[in-house]
């Protein structure tokens, strides 16, 4: 640890007001030591990691961190802020900021040391000592473990133990058991009731900090609750698998992760709490209480489905949920669960239908069934085959949407009523809106049924018989008799309204959809616009207005990555090396209608990239509608241009939006560079080489 941090990497008077400024101030110290080769590239990597998951922790701690090709050796810089800096923690700003930089190919030994530090952050004596440190040398010594924190005589010993074995070894089972409080009284002759046993897995995207902090937090909470726990940390330093007998003896499982758990099938059938890694850091006691409650209810796994722990992913609400999360946030997660599972059906079905049209023309929808007539040598037969397969795939859209909205709310038990309700929505012509309603109702019904206390003898048949039977019957009744027809009427009215749009109204709608497509680049708002468009064409005979909307949405979604690619080409000096490389890939991603290709640029500079993209997307969406471009395929980018109505004008609309976004990004980044240069090179200090050692050095854009 001695070569990873030092007094020159400690700032006890960090004056930054934002997390970006804090990261820059600490990263500049790393760059001055030669540990960071490209400051802007490294900060872009830090911002991209921050965009995945906020790095603020309860207790006033911020731990921005990342792996980066711009880091030469594992390094840690520490800053202490008097005013506090917002890193997204639930309890407020952070006054202790740890910037952790790991090379892209860091060795396990260094990463193990960093994981040991992450565990120390869960030690109140350690953080209190850092807050009281009077000079940088003392703080650096505390971080290195060379000086124990006052009031924690065994901290150095614990740090050493953590450094030697930061992953949960199978032998830890006996060690954890030994932490149960001793009474000092003779043991009764009757065998005492065995303690509750938990196995846990923790993992985070980078595998450096949250993984090990979550493990330490769970172990501390288990110790206080008198529970035995063994944690498997699936971090960057590798992981040692829990022994099968340890898993078999466990009464419950906690999976705290933001990346997929490796070999998850090992935990099949165990009562499971599946959540995000920050939940284990911030509220471990609640998770332990939750898994004990699930075990007491008769072995219900996460979401209430027995036996699903090893095969079912966590529901969107359970993963990463935090205390106080509002209903609006939960609703968004439920809807996004359905949309994410629906999109592959949209892409497959839509492209197959488009291929059928491309081969056989727009009359192919009147072809007889290929089961009655199929000629191997006739193009029309193949066109009819593709069209009819695509139609079958499209028929799943509403049931899948409803089924996985219910899954997002209630896990696997929600699938049956969700699919049934979605199919009924199609039967009564309630369409897309009916699918949304069916999914939400199905999830609510299942959750209500699961709250009913039932005899232990019946718990085994609940997930496979009782819950599907009751929930499907209730949802079917509501969709057929109560709400199906009113929703169908609303769907018909919305379709008529869209068909009646023309002129300025259509152009405004195109601009709005373009703004939405470029707002979060594949996020919830983007998906709302995309789902709205695909729902309109997911019928056997879509209206002209629906195909215009689909064309506008796809055109706008192509703008951000193509604009970033063009900007890195015409003004490369405004971008760092990593962004220039991302720009090369963005050409292909943008041409393929993958808006996410612009995310690295937006994460590094959101205040300039996102507004510029939204303006360009609005221009493209409005022009596409004004040009009456139409599109039957829900995906494909430039590869489905032959299927687009008015293709040349459509390409003009895309090109116009790309040029607008490119120009805005270049102007805004140029202004930022000028402002930065004026600050870092003040009057009489134009030559950076004249600066005194330790002075703030200018950085390149």
Image (cartoon, grey):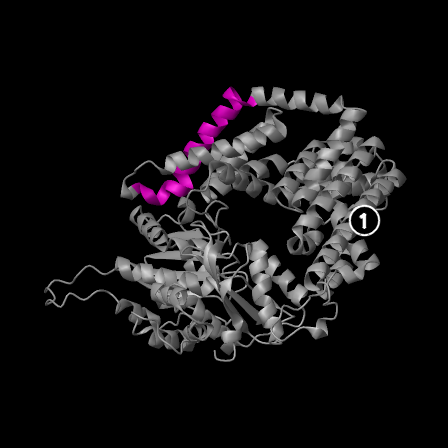
Q: Measuring 51% from the left and 54% from the top, which residue is drawn there?
A: 87
Q: Is residue 429 left or right of residue 377?
A: left
Highlighted magenta segment, given as a residue range: 458-484
Question: Residue at position x 42%, y 61% from top?
Answer: 214
Q: Residue at x 30, y 38 (%)?
A: 454
Q: Report the label total.
A: 1
Considering depth in this image, is 373 or 269 the residue closer to the camera?
269
Q: Position of residue 44 (x, y in %)?
A: 65, 61
Q: Left of 504 or right of it: where is 62? A: left
Residue 120 percent location from the top left of the image: 40, 68
Query: In this rendering, is residue 429 above or below 375?
Result: above
**In terms of depth relative to the viewer, which is nearer, 44 or 307?**
44
Main SS of residues in magenta: helix
> Quick check: 541 above or below 641?
above
- Determine which residue is flagged by label 1: 663
> Is 457 positioned to the left or the right of 379 in the image?
left
**Helix, strand or loop at disc 1?**
helix
Q: Residue furthest right?
A: 648
Packing grade of label 1 (10 A; few <14, some 14-19, many >=20) is some
Please identify the quadrant where the C terminus is shown.
Answer: bottom right
Residue 480 magenta-highlighted: yes
Residue 449 at what x, y percent from top left?
Answer: 38, 35
Q: Is residue 120 visible?
A: yes
Asked whether 113 or 436 is in front, the reply is 113
Is residue 309 something that shows in the picture? Answer: no
Task: Answer with left or right where residue 253 lies relative to residue 209.
Answer: left
673 within the magenta span = no
Image x and y of residue 679, in percent:
68, 60
């Amino acid at each position: 640890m001695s070569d990873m941090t030092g007094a020159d990497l400690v700032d006890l008077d960090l004056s930054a007001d934002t997390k970006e400024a804090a990261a820059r101030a600490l990263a500049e110290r790393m760059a001055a030591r030669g540990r960071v080769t490209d400051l802007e590239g490294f900060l872009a990597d830090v911002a991209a990691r921050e965009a995945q998951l906020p790095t603020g922790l309860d207790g006033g701690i911020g731990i921005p961190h990342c792996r980066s090709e711009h880091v030469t050796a594992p390094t840690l810089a520490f800053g202490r802020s008097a005013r506090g800096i917002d890193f997204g923690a639930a309890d407020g700003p952070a006054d202790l900021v740890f910037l952790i930089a790991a090379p892209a190919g860091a060795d396990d030994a260094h990463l193990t040391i960093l994981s040991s530090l992450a565990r120390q952050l869960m030690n109140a004596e350690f953080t209190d000592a850092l807050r009281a440190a009077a000079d940088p040398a003392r703080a650096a010594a505390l971080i290195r473990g060379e000086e124990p924190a006052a009031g924690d005589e065994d901290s150095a010993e614990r740090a050493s133990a953590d450094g030697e074995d930061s992953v949960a070894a199978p032998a830890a089972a006996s060690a954890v058991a030994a932490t149960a409080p001793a009474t000092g009284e003779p043991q009764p002759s009757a065998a005492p009731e065995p303690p509750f046993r938990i196995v846990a897995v923790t993992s985070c995207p980078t595998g450096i900090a949250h993984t090990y902090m979550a493990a330490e937090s769970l172990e501390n909470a288990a110790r206080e609750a008198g529970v035995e726990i063994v944690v498997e940390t699936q971090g960057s330093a590798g992981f040692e698998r829990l022994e099968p007998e340890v898993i078999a003896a466990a009464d419950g499982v906690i999976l705290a992760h933001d990346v997929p758990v490796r070999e998850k099938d090992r935990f099949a059938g165990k009562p499971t709490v599946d959540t995000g890694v920050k939940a284990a850091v911030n509220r471990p006691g609640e998770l332990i209480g939750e898994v004990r409650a699930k075990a007491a209810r008769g072995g219900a796994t996460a979401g209430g489905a027995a036996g699903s722990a090893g095969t079912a992913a966590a529901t969107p609400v359970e993963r990463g949920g935090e205390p106080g999360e509002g209903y609006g946030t939960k609703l968004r997660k439920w809807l996004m669960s359905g949309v994410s599972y629906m999109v592959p059906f949209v892409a497959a079905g839509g492209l197959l239908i488009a291929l059928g049209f491309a081969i056989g023309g727009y009359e192919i929808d009147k072809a007889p069934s290929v089961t009655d007539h199929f000629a191997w040598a006739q193009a029309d037969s193949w066109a009819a085959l593709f069209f009819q397969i695509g139609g079958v795939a499209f028929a799943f859209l509403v049931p899948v949407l409803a089924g996985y909205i219910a899954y997002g709310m209630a896990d696997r038990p929600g699938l049956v009523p969700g699919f049934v309700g979605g199919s009924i929505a199609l039967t009564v012509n309630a369409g897309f809106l009916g699918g949304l309603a069916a999914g939400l109702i199905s999830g609510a019904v299942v959750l209500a049924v699961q709250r009913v206390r039932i005899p232990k003898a019946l718990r085994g048949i609940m997930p496979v018989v009782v819950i599907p039977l009751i929930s499907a019957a209730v949802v079917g009744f509501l969709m057929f008799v109560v709400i199906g027809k009113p929703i169908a009427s609303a769907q018909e009215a919305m379709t008529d309204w869209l068909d009646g749009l023309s002129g300025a109204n259509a152009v405004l709608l195109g601009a709005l959809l373009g703004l939405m497509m470029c707002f979060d680049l594949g996020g919830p708002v983007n998906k709302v616009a995309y789902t709205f468009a695909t729902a309109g064409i997911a019928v056997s005979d879509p209206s002209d207005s629906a195909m215009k909307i689909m064309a506008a949405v796809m055109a706008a979604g192509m703008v951000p990555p193509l604009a970033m690619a063009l900007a890195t080409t015409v003004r490369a000096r405004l971008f760092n090396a990593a962004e220039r490389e991302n720009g090369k890939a963005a050409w292909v991603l943008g041409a393929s209608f993958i808006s996410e290709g612009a995310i690295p640029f937006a994460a590094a500079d959101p205040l300039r990239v996102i507004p510029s993209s939204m303006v360009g997307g609005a221009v493209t969406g409005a022009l596409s509608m004004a040009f009456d471009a139409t599109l039957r395929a829900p995906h494909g980018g430039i590869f489905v241009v032959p299927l687009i109505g008015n293709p040349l004008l459509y390409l003009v609309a895309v090109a116009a939006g790309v040029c607008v976004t490119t120009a805005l990004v270049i102007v805004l980044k140029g202004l930022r560079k000028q402002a930065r240069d004026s600050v870092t090179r003040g009057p009489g200090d134009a030559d950076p080489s004249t600066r005194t050692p330790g002075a703030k050095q200018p950085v390149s854009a």
